[in-house]
Every structure is written in structure tokens, then in C-alpha cells.
Image (spheres, rainbow, N blue to C red):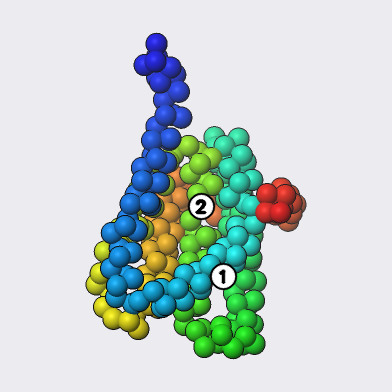
Amino acid sequence: MILQKIKNHKTIVKNTGYLSIIEVIRMAMPFIALPYVLKTIGASNYGLAVFAQTIISYFSIFINFGLDVSAVKDVSINRNDPKTLNAIVSSVLLIKFVLFCLAFAVLLLGIAVIPFMHEYKTLFLAAFLTCLSEVLFPIWFYQGIEKMEFLTFIRTSSILFYTITVFIFVRQTDDYTNVVLLQSLGNLLAGGISAFCILKVAKIRLVFPQWDMLVTTFRESMLFFV
């Protein structure tokens, strides 16, 4: 009876399994790299790196603007309608790109007027690179089409990239910026792979969406952002 229920909900079970794999890898990998990082750059410099990433995480929330939640439903409903799906994906990506540009302008302003941010501007800019992956990496799309195996592969590639390269490029105390940069590059790698999968595997065509659709998409995400 249990086996029959599993068969009836095969897609749900499979996607739950893939999400579980991502979470296990995400939690396990820091135990491999973190002790080495702390020993190499020191607790104080690691604190600086984490502080910069924390500040940038607020920019990430702004760039996502709730779209990672609202877009899942739209993609799921229209997954078998290529024309509408193209418009949905294009609308979300365009909105995120505009928000990314606004966030980058605010960051540059902060670096210009806040002494602490100006002193560590390289660190903040390295951390901000991860925001570009928020534009390129549409988790919402894979959730909507229920293809979590793509998400698992992409996330795993990103985490493995960071874990391996941190042992190569972080060799002394002053390399704390490299810790942030490598993590951002790992996220950009995930974004690049994701963009390839969307265009070549999922066959999504980017189009310039109509103004009404942009406004609707933005409004639907606003509640989730708040």
C-alpha cells in the first residue's frame, strides 16, 4: 500500500529527494571548508567577509522581490504553453535585471559616502557579484516545471566549485576577499549553467514582454516581497 502511494506521487517523492540532496550537501560542505578558512584567514577577517555577505544579502532580497515565489505558480500553470512561458520567464528576468541595476547603483553610492564600505570596497564588490546569480539562476522556473534534478546538479556544481577552489586560492590571512569572491563565482557558475539549461534544454526563447505583463508580474510579487 505504501509502495502504491509512492508510485501515485512519484513526481513529488522524486523532487523531495532532490531537494533533500541539496540540503545535505549545503550543510555538509561547510564542515569541510570552514575549519580551513578560519585557520587560514583568522576569525576577524572571516567576520569581515561574513559581514559583507550579510549586507549584500539584503540586496539579494530586493532583487528577488518575491518573484521566486510568485513566478512558480505562473510557470506551473503555463508549463505546456511555450509562448506564454517565454513571456513569463522574460518578464521575471527583465524585472530582476532592472532591480539588479538599481541595487548596484545604491551599493556604489554606499561605497562613495560610507567610510567603512569605501575601505573594504573590493570585499563588498566581490560579495555583490553573487547578486548577478540571483538574476541568472531561476529557481522558480525549475520548481514550476517540477524538474528539481536540474536544480540539484546546478547547486552541487556551485558548492563543489567553492569547496575545491578555497583550498587552492586561500593561502594566507589577506586572502579573505578571495573567500567571498570564490563563493560569488560559484554562484555565478550556477547561474551560467542554469541559463544554458533554460535556453538549450528547456528551449525557452527570450522575448521583450508587453508592458501590461511586466506590471502584473511586478504587482503579484510585491506582497511576497513585503
Q: Which residue is mark 2?
A: 138
| Coordinates of residue 14 in the picture (x, y in percent) | 39, 32
The type of residue carrying mark 2 is Pro
Please name the residue that numbered disc 1 is placed on. Answer: 55
| Quarter of the figure that contains the C terminus | bottom right
Q: Quadrant of residue 7?
A: top left
Q: Position of residue 90 (x, y in %)?
A: 59, 54
Kindly identify the residue that appears in the image at 29 percent across and 75 percent down.
40
Q: Is residue 125 left or right of residue 26?
A: right
- Residue 91 visible in this rendered orientation of the protein: no
Location of residue 4 with respect to 79 vertically, above or below: above
Count of picture labels: 2
Relative to the observer, which residue lies in front, 10 or 97?
10
Amino acid type, mark 1: Ile
Disc 1 is placed on an element classified as: helix
Other-residue count near label 2 (Cα within 10 Å), few / some / many at <14 / 14–19 / ≥20:
many
Report the front residue among 96 and 46.
Answer: 46
Quadrant of the image containing the N terminus: top left
- In the rendered image of this protein, does residue 184 appear above or below residue 70? below
Residue at left offset 51%, top offset 41%:
143
- Where residue 181 sits, quadrant-wise, is bottom left
**Which of marks 1 and 2 precedes in the sequence?**
1
